[in-house]
Image: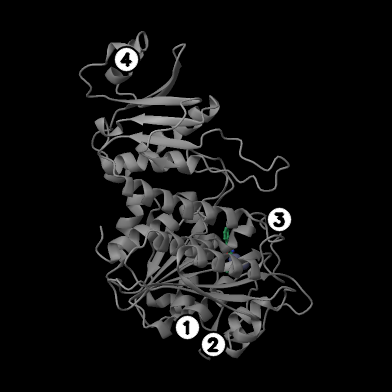
Amino acid sequence: MFTNKPPKSLKETAKVYFFSSTAKTIPDIFGNQKNYIVECVKAGKSDVKFVFNGIDKLFFVIYSPSKNTDSEYILEDIRILGSQLCKLANSHRTNAIILEKPTSLFNSSQTLAFLEGLELTNYEFFRHLKKGGPSNSLENVFVNDKIIKEESLTELNKTLYAVKITKDIVNEPVIFFNATDLGNFAKKQGKANGFSVHVMNKKEIEKNKMGGLLGVNKGSIDEPTFTVMQYKPKNAKNKKPLVFVGKGVVYDTGGNNLKINGVMGTMKCDMGGGAAVIGALTAISSNRLPIYAVGIVPATDNRIGLNALVQDDIITISDGTTVEIQNTDAEGRLILADALVYAKKYNPALVIDLATLTGAASNVTGPYGIALMANKTKYKTIMVESGKEVYERCAEFVMWREYNELIKSDVADIKNIGGPTGGMITAAKFLEHFVSYDWIHLDIAGPAFISGAASHYHHKGASGVGVRLLYNFAKKFIGKK
Ligand code: BES
Ligand code: ZN
Ligand code: ZN
């Protein structure tokens, strides 16, 4: 969407001018709009305004940086301004906009944040509408600014494309997107962007004795898949891989502990972690980051069915650990256990898992951020920093040893729920049981899917959370940022 090559046709194109609260002079070419700009500037008001002067469509972006504000808020305010421009441009049926020297107002990373907010806002999920196309008119954004390099725009385009496809597959209902579809989708992305993909079918999953994934799949008529993606360029800066693991529950009915009272709705988002892992591999490979990265996504739906798991069942994870099922709705941790065991064979530098794992995490973070839990790893601070920069913030929760007591079982090695205390922590403790390397767990149950009010670039439905975070983290991991 973004380029700094000028448009071929000026039809339906509008120019965008930028003004700051520190602007000394406003050019006379803006006629009686000049007063409006001067007033906003004086009042320290950030605003986006549309003007049609009889010949040209013009947009003014007026920005007044708030003082004494943390840097993450400054960048986020700029994303929001980009979002406002997108909405206004679409409301005036503008097809293309030319941003006239945004660096007169923003530095380079702020300009990219402005573009990011703009593009994220322009997302629409229209596949199942009769008209089958977008409602938005905006298609092209030309950045008329020598300071912004074409490479930065290309990188942003590719990363935001990865966010878009992630949203698309999370928004897709299970009737069109089951575990096999998820594996095929990963293959398609691998082929297009140059990472290898192996999708294990049920037979191979059985051979690997993945009792967690097979257990959850017992209630389903669709087969499970276990997708392994690998991006290993010759110029990779790391020998040991960075491994991403994502929960791929393509639908979570709760199983025999059926979700009732309306809480089942939105559970098509329960593969949000898996989708983000595919998105992150896509962003990394399409941008040719010199990093050895692996993505693992165990996938199945969690349904009621004649043979579905019941309370009191005992299943065996691929490392031999036995698990007493005390709630069939705590299924994510069962399939992730097999994936975390599998990750070990890569001798990873770090494993990061992403999962829409618990209502407990969602109740704490809401859509505003991610619940982070980890073992002792030096990478935790880098993750928190990455989260601030992309505004997918990570709030850390404790992992005190006493929580281990809550998942002890009388009849098996562990049980799959821990009771009312700290649900996101006992879930993380369950996962930690299968971890033997540096590890960060990101519970994205809160931000993965927006069902409440939309705000700015956070529209209703899938958010694509995790893709920008992991991409930013990956760059820091190899010292590229
Ligand atoms: N997929 C859900 C968690 C979830 C809740 C995701 C809300 C997104 C939004 C998960 O599988 C689940 O049902 N967890 C249970 C665990 C409980 C039974 C211990 C929960 O959090 O209620
Ligand atoms: Zn569940
Ligand atoms: Zn779930």
Quadrant position of ligand 1: bottom right
Residue type of the residue flagged with mark 2: Ser
In what element is the residue under mark 4? helix
Q: Give the residue number, with chain letter if any, for mark 4.
A: 39
Which element type, helix, strand or loop, lies under badge 3? loop
Quarter of the image with the N terminus is top left
User: Hey, which quadrant is residue 115 in on the image?
Assistant: top left
Residue 141 position, x and y percent, is: 43, 36
Task: Check disc 3 and give the amino acid type.
Answer: Asn
The front one of 220 and 322 is 220
Q: Secondary structure at mark 1?
A: helix
Q: Residues within 10 Å of mark 1 (few under 14, many from 20)?
A: some
Label whose residue precedes the other's in the sequence (2 or 3) = 3
Q: Are marks 2 and 1 in contact (CB under 8 Å)?
A: yes
Classed neighbour count for the residue bearing mark 3: other residues with Cα under 10 Å, few (<14), some (14–19), many (≥20): few
The three-letter code of the residue at mark 4 reads: Glu
Q: Mark 4 touching mark 3, by CB under 8 A?
A: no
Residue projecting furthest to the front: 8
Q: Which mark is residue 341?
A: 1
Which residue has dot 3 on it?
A: 261
Picture coordinates of residue 112, whole percent (x, y): 34, 43
